[in-house]
Image (cartoon, rainbow, N blue to C red):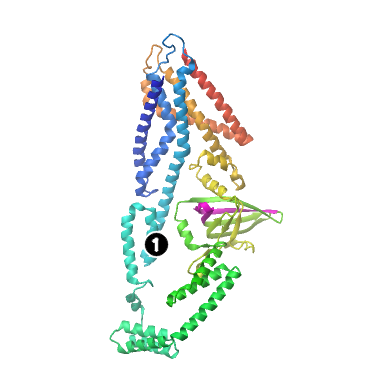
Amino acid sequence: MARMTIRVLWVALTLCGLAFLFFLTLSFNQFSSQMFEISYRGRWAFDNSIIKLIKYFPALMGSAILICYSLFYKPALNDSEGETLPFYRLVMYSLILFLISTLAGFLLNEVIDPGAEARQYRRMEETIISREIRQLAEEAEKNGDPRTALEFYKRLSTLQPEETESLEIKQESLEQQLARTGAGGESTETFMRMVDKSPQELLNEARGYEIEEDYFSAYYYSSLAYQIDNQYPDARQFAARMWSKIESTAPMREELERSYIFNKKKEGTAHLSAGRGMDAYYLFLTLREYLSENEIAPDPDINKYLETARQLCLESSYFTEDTYTALTSPGYRNLVFRNRDTVNGREHTEIVSFGRAISHIPSRGMWMVKDVQVIRYNQTGIQYKFTAPFGKIIFGSADGSRGRLIMHGINPRDKEANFHVTYLEGSSRLELENILPLYIGSRELEALAEESLDYTMTNLLWLWEGRGVLDEAGFPSGKIHLKILEKILYPFSFIILCLISVTFGWRMRQRSGGPIPATFLLFPFLPSLVFSLFELYTAANVSLLSFIRDLGGFIPAFTILLVIQAIILTFSFILMAGQRS
């Protein structure tokens, strides 16, 4: 008996190996360069083969049992002393193998398959993002913006490490271009070509600034005249004289600078005390740049207050630079859910839509979203409708059950380039501003994301813990319940398939011993045939459970599942035991 069990195991492993090679070859041919970057081809084919192999694993195991029990096995009903063997002695080792195979198939479905599915989805997302970034980089390069193009290519190199060498060459070229143009982004030669004045005209303009006692501007324009024509002595002498005047007024200038910095720091701290984080942030940012531009020693107070203002801003806004980092990573697309709240005893409902969402900092329950749309309505109709280009979700409660959607984006350099909510219908509420309370938690948002992908990247434990969370978000929970029932059904279906395969394997033998000749004709088609029967059995059960779930709910469907599988499992044992005769 043990020898036969080992033979079944070897045949099953051989079939799995051959099936994997077949799926691998097929996957290489099925690879789509339109959906995935060509650099993903090998890894995509491998993971796709793993997914296919796990899907066909019950059929391969059933085929191995049919082959072995029809070709090699005839139950020895008597032991060496001529006494009839008990039934458990005939099937003990086989049942152990079937239970181990069932456990292996269940673990493959719950651990390996979700991981492979997640990697395939992430590759598809990375392909979409990489192509978007590549297009933006090429456009920036074409429009003469090497700094922006360089940032895009750097991000692209993190997403496509296989192209690191070619991307590094591109980055070096852009860095050299930036080095030639200087920190301001334009070369001196380019700037001079833009100056439509002669050296004498520039010198006359410099003399006008001297009269106004603006010695810095006078020095600048006279120096520019000298750079255009370094054989122009008047410009050089004038520039030297202006520099001397600048140095002679240095003590007075330093006193004015100290006074200016003191007053600005006083104004900034007043903003902080009043909770005006954004005003304080821009003020201290401008002040820090002022110190840098005028070659004044850094002030530690300014850096400290700037960081304080930044943290204060993050409580009610986000920085636009964060959207680029977060939303150029794989995430979820097209999430829609219902957001309910009650104000003054009246229920209001909002339909919230995100074009794209990604869990930016999972440990802190923070999400970044793009293309936000919100419609709020009650019994009287639509109250307002607004959109926002980006948003940040923070789940602040201890259990992560409530969150805030923050839609005010702060540009770290340009106050006029901030992101705000745009109302398409209705008007803003004073208490709303750019923050929308969310009445779902981080767990519900994850469930919504997985629901949009048909739960291909989740296991039974996750589904069991998250069951029912979709009702509150406006989604029927039928899909998640059926997925749970289908996963619970899998081990029952697997073990029943193994028992039925033993029965049919014995049936495919002649009474005199040896297989029925027609058996050999079925061998090439066994995996497909067994797989079709396994899928048909699963689909029939799921359809029945779906009907029961719609009538009575999840618990009755779960109970019926256990009862039906127990009956069929008992019948399978009886059917196999009947082959003793």
**Residue closer to the observer: 288 or 107:** 288
Instruction: Give the residue drawn at x 40%, y 88%.
Output: 245
Residue 35 locus on image (x, y percent):
40, 48
Q: Which residue is most to the left?
A: 231
Above or below residue 349? Residue 427 is below
Between residues 92 and 442, which one lies in front from this camera angle?
A: 92
Instruction: Find residue 423 and report its horizontal and vertical position in percent.
Output: 58, 62
Q: Quadrant of residue 190?
A: bottom left
First to last magenta residue range: 346-369
Judge whether residue 139 can be spotted in this image: no
Task: Please tell me which residue lies in front, 348 or 100.
Answer: 100
Q: Residues within 10 Å of mark 1 (few under 14, many from 20)?
A: some
Q: Amino acid at mark 1?
A: Glu
Q: Furthest-bottom residue in view?
A: 211
Residue 150 figure quarter: bottom left
Residue at the image position 50 percent from the left and 63 percent from the top: 319
